[in-house]
Image (tube, rainbow, N blue to C red):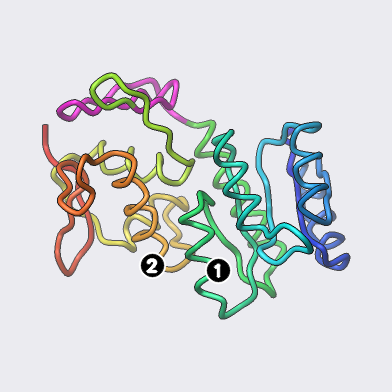
Amino acid sequence: MKKILVVDDEESILKIVDFALAEAGYEVHLARDGYGAEFMFDQVKPDLVILDVMLPGKSGLDIAKDLRSKSDIPIIMLSARGDEIDRILGLEFGADDYVTKPFSPRELVSRVKAILRRVEGAPAEKIRVGDLEIDALSRQVTLAGQAIHLTTSEYSILMHLARHPGQAFSRQAILSALWDETPVGEERAVDVHIHNIREKLEADHKNPAYVLTVRGYGYRLRES
């Protein structure tokens, strides 16, 4: 049974999410602030974290940044509708996805399932493009022999591009690849994930050598 840590200071949100995830077959653990989130993370060792942006004391953004510094665990951020800056910052700090409040519990569960499938469902293959190597079985990415640490969404985007080197994909097509053919979320999120990938992968992220922009359309990975 997969373990989900839910962090939110609104009791009503915790109850709704707890019930929805438990009904879907997950083991749910709850925390109401940053201290509780960090304590539960170390104690429970969850498979995925759902984290509200606005928390008493330490913010959800700071917690996401701290979690990402020590783990590649998938993180879904919860943010108030209209707070685009918080959603973008969440992705820049290492979150894999965000859901805006108010939200459908069914939608949240579907996002959890999709992200966990990405973690689990990799066929055994290795892809090499220049000095870049992706091992789908171990989910390890190396560049000239050096390990590159990507979030679940960053890895999934890179792997999708790598399976079709040279082929251009629109932002909507990349969203479709992430969410099992049904695009979920905003195209802006794809841009942030690509930016993060380039920060980690490219010697000069402003003049990328691997993940290339197709102007007015989307992105592609260079051919080997």
Residue 203 position in % (x across, y down): 21, 40
214 relative position to 173: left or right: left
Q: Which residue is mark 1?
A: 86
155 relative position to 116: left or right: left
Q: Toward the viewer: 123 or 12?
A: 12
Whether residue 198 appears in magenta in the rendering, the answer is no
Residue type (three-letter) at the residue carrying disc 1: Asp
Q: Residue at x 80, y 39 (%)?
A: 39
Separation of disc 1 and disc 2 at Cα? 13 Å
Residue 198 position in % (x across, y down): 29, 46
- Specify the quadrant of the image occupied by residue 58: bottom right
Q: Is residue 94 above or below residue 47?
A: below
Residue 40 position in % (x across, y down): 80, 39
140 relative position to 63: left or right: left
- Dot 1: within a 10 Å radius of its alpha carbon, few (fewer than 14), some, or many (20 or more) residues? some
**SS at circle 2:** helix
**SS at circle 1:** helix
Residue type (three-letter) at the residue carrying disc 2: Arg
Q: Residue at x 70, y 67 (%)?
A: 54
Q: Residue at x 47, y 53 (%)?
A: 179
Q: Which residue is mark 2?
A: 188
Q: Residue at x 37, y 50 (%)?
A: 196
Residue 10 position in % (x across, y down): 83, 67
Q: Which residues are drawn in magenta?
A: 122-141
Whether residue 126 appears in magenta in the rendering, the answer is yes
Q: Toward the viewer: 32 or 100?
A: 32
Image quadrant holding the C terminus, namely top left
- Specify the quadrant of the image occupied by residue 16: bottom right
Looking at the rendered image, the disc whose residue lies closer to the viewer, 1 or 2, is 1
